[in-house]
Image (cartoon, helix red, strand yellow):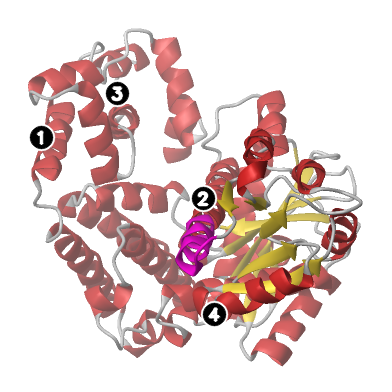
Amino acid sequence: MQTVMIVDDEVIFRDYLRGVLDWDTLGFEITVEAKNGVEALELCAHNPVDIALIDITMPFMDGLELTRRLKEQYPEISIVLITGHNEFEYARTALKLGVEDYILKPFSKDELMLTLLKLQQEHRKVQLDNFTYKENQQLVKESFLNRLISSDLLLTDEEILTRLGQFKIHIQNPVFVVVCIEIDHMDRKWQKISERMLMKYAVTNILNEALDESWKHHMFNGPEGRIIGLVEHADDQANMTPSLDGYRKLGALIKKYLNFTITIGIGRSKEGFKNIHESYHEALVALQNKFVLGHDRVITYEAVAGEVGKQVFYPAEVNDELLIELRMRNSEQVQRILDSVFDSIVERRLSMDYVYVICIGLISVNLAYITESGHPIEECFGENFFPYNEIRKFDSLEGTFEWIKELFHKAIRYTGQYKNTRAAKIAQSAKAYIEQCYPDPELQLEQVAQHVFINASYLRAVFKKEFGMTLSDYITQYRMKKAKELLGRGGQRLADIAESVGYNDASYFSKSFKKFYGYSPSGYEKNRT
């Protein structure tokens, strides 16, 4: 509903304007009426409007002066000047002041209506543009913060501070704790994405009221439907756990007023931006323990760290590798990774509770892939798909393993049905060429583009859309994967391995490997022995 102000010194004309149109039906509401410019300014100060219909000739302050002042104080207001024939030169002056339109007396009902509808359309376009801009800014902000917690951000501290400042996040004390909040049974409770987003929004709003104001909480949507909190730690010490009172209060408020439960995983404090991802991974480990400890609770990494040390989980990068291979729809590699995880479980004889924790993590990766691909989970797996209940029905590890493998293959088959476009085939050809020519140190986007006979910019776009990563990132990822395989076999010099995966400089290869995996080639070999 657009609000309208009428300013005219003649009461008869004000009455005429009020009754000439069915304002409500057209989407307008007359909220202010004034008999001169002075009164209009006073009323508008307490009740701003979208559109003003103003007569030129009025006592105390004419329409031109009122127009000038309104435009200074309310730049978004649209002004329609109402004038007689002999005041046309005044109207031209008013247009220079920013008046959107003018109507010459006498005017018809249709002329007034068309003028107003045109302004209404312009207002709605501005509102839509503003909403889209804010929505895009929120997406950019969340993307940046997600990269910050995942260690996938190669920026200096100064550059990070600048980017955060652009999002109105001003860091005073660079010691951070990451908090992961998960709505329990969210996929089962709400089928529509809009409903899930609404519940997450409600949790975030209540959280801001429940927590201690001395701690700054920067909340955003994280991977796999979780709410992530980047918290500035009140103390300067690392490896500290924050007070849990506020988080327990949050859980109680959610249960009381929204009638569902949440589970919260909390990492320890870490100093500096480069170590935020460590607290994030600790929070995830804590959150995964809800399968063992139960839902509707606050779980700290500190509380479960002892148990985590006793029970060996599969490496943290396995989930990342699985997601990459899913994006590539590489069934054989997915099968290989899952077999490796399952073999490790059997070899180490992990307890059933910890097997369930690992299974939940694997299923979450699969569901994240379906959601990321833009498809509803229920379309792939059916309306009655409740994986967290299903895994409890199996009476053997083998049965659980086979069921999870089938879930992954079903996801690949399902998403593959929607990827038979020409662009997808080009991206697949580029991927195959990379996997064949990755040892070539000169392999770059332009070379791949020449091979598939398309423009480099177009290839960059279709590859990113098809696989969720840039072509250059895939070259690096594939080289690192091959290097890891060679290191695992042992018996080769680092320089030979570097050359075989496309690096002429062994030192640069070693730095790239550490940047990609978080540990050096020698560190990887040492941990395997």
The picture places residue 132, in percent across and down from the top left corner, at 51, 52
Horizontally, residue 139 falls left or right of residue 385, namely: right
**Real-space Cα separation, disc 2 to disc 4, in angstroms:** 28 Å
x then y, percent, for residue 211: 83, 68
The residues tagged by marks 4 and 1 sit, at their Cα atoms, a distance apart of 62 Å
Image quarter where the N terminus lies is: bottom right
Residue at 12% x, 27% y is 436
Q: Residue at x 37, y 68 (%)?
A: 363
Q: Which residue is mark 2?
A: 129
Which is more foreground, mark 3 or mark 2? 2
**In the rendered structure, which segment of residues is drawn in magenta?**
107-120
Name the mark nearer the viewer: 4 or 1: 4
Chief secondary structure of the magenta span?
helix
Residue type of the residue flagged with mark 2: Asp
Does dot 4 land on a helix, a strand or a loop? Answer: loop
Q: Which residue is mark 1?
A: 429
Q: Quadrant of residue 218?
A: bottom right
Of residues 342 and 208, which is closer to you in this image? Answer: 208
Pointer 4: what residue? 22
Give me the residue at 22% from left, 47% from top.
Answer: 328
Q: Which residue is mark 3?
A: 491
Q: Earlier in the sequence, mark 2 or mark 4?
A: 4
* Depicted 9 relative to depicted 465: above or below: below
- The residues bearing labels 4 and 3 have C-alpha atoms spaced at a distance of 86 Å
Question: What mark, if any, has residue 122 been given in the picture?
Answer: none
- The residue lying at 50 percent from left, 74 percent from top is 26
Name the kind of residue labelled 1 in the image: Ser
Q: State the image coordinates of residue 22 (x, y, percent, origin top left).
A: 54, 80
Separation of marks 2 and 1 at Cα, in angstroms: 39 Å
Q: Tell me the element at label 3.
A: loop
| SS label for mark 1 | helix
